[in-house]
Image (cartoon, rainbow, N blue to C red):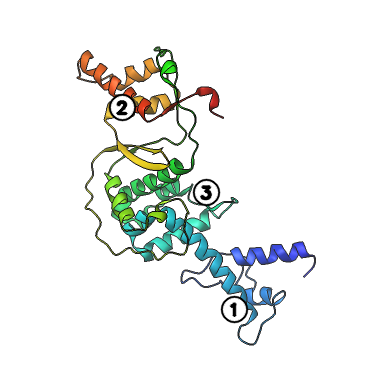
Amino acid sequence: MGTLLELQKRMAEDVMRPLTPDFQMQATSEAGVSTADLVSSYIKPNDRLSSFERLEIYNRQYWFRIIDALSEDFPALSAVLGSEVFNELILAYLRDNPSRSFTLRDLGSRMPEWIRRNPEYAAERHDLVVDVVALEWAYVEAFDRAALPPLDAAEQSGFSPETSLKLQPHLQLLSLQYPVDELVLAVHKEKPASDIMSNAVSGHHRNDHFALPPMEPRETLLAVHRFQNTVYYRRLERETFTILSLLQSGESIGVAFELAFRDSELSVEEQMVKIQECFAHAAQLGWFCKAEEIV
């Protein structure tokens, strides 16, 4: 077999090789070599299991842990698609996006973009599924990302039209076609509280057999944020969402206000009320943070 390093690389490659659609170890490698022959070169059989069967235990457990991690981050996706289709989707996703990070937290980071480019798993529900995945990944980001020191009252009193504000890294702004916050919350209510955290618990039994709220298209603008170590979904009005999105992208306060109300039929007084409400809520929740703290 060669050196210890060569043995480790060989075994790692075999353990991490994707499973078959029925969750078995593949009979041949990517090069067409018999897996049984490869495995027998470094694993001995015993009186109960062949070399292939012994390694298959590790191969399956590796992938079951990976699949379980994604199941924990995307429980609503599983509930919408059903376990069978969800498992097929996960295997396809992992074939295109194998784990490259030291932490399972990052495993689903490419799911929102991947699901947009692979509509075949959701068929006519693709737009709904895209929204579900966007919200579930936003939850992970909001839960894990930094919360920087918010601006104090004195710092907020010096705003001018030229001021550029920084928003908290954990704040996620989503423009959705469906009110999937209702659906995701319904799924979370059916799960133990600890399962709502990103990859907090493994090995749980997934229950997809419960009634989901009906979903009809309706524009839904959300802020997904963390407050006192809990993630919340907050629906926003169009003007507030536009202002916050523009500030988040680096625009000044003046530009954000101008673009948010460019085609508005609101009076100047009504616009001022909207702006005051937007800033009051954002300040109360600590969404504005110190620019020099951003790295």
Tag 2–tag 1 contact (CB < 8 Å): no
Q: Which mark is residue 53?
A: 1
Q: Residue 27 location, x and y as percent?
A: 58, 74
* The image quarter in which residue 281 lies: top left
**Distance in Å between CA atoms under marks 2 and 3:** 30 Å
Q: Residue 153 location, x and y as percent?
A: 41, 19
Q: Is residue 208 above or below residue 233?
A: below
Tag 1–tag 3 contact (CB < 8 Å): no
| Amino acid type for the residue under numbered disc 2 | Thr
Q: Earlier in the sequence, mark 2 or mark 3?
A: 3
Q: Quadrant of the C terminus?
A: top right
Q: Nearer the viewer, residue 64 or 143?
A: 143
> Foreground mark, 1 or 3?
3
Q: Residues within 10 Å of mark 3 (few under 14, many from 20)?
A: some
Q: Is residue 86 above or below residue 251?
A: below
Q: Earlier in the sequence, mark 1 or mark 3?
A: 1
Q: Which mark is residue 162?
A: none
Q: Is residue 216 left or right of residue 161?
A: left
Q: Secondary structure at mark 2?
A: helix
**Distance in Å between CA atoms under marks 1 and 3:** 30 Å
Q: Which mark is residue 106?
A: 3
Q: Nearer the viewer, residue 14 or 245?
A: 245
Residue 27 visible in the displayed image: no
Q: Residue at the location (63% across, 67% down)?
A: 14
Q: Secondary structure at mark 1?
A: helix
Q: Residue at the location (61% across, 86% down)?
A: 48
- Residue with the mark numbered 2: 240
> Foreground mark, 2 or 1?
2
**Distance in Å between CA atoms under marks 2 and 1:** 58 Å
Q: Is residue 133 left or right of residue 169?
A: left
Q: Earlier in the sequence, mark 2 or mark 1?
A: 1
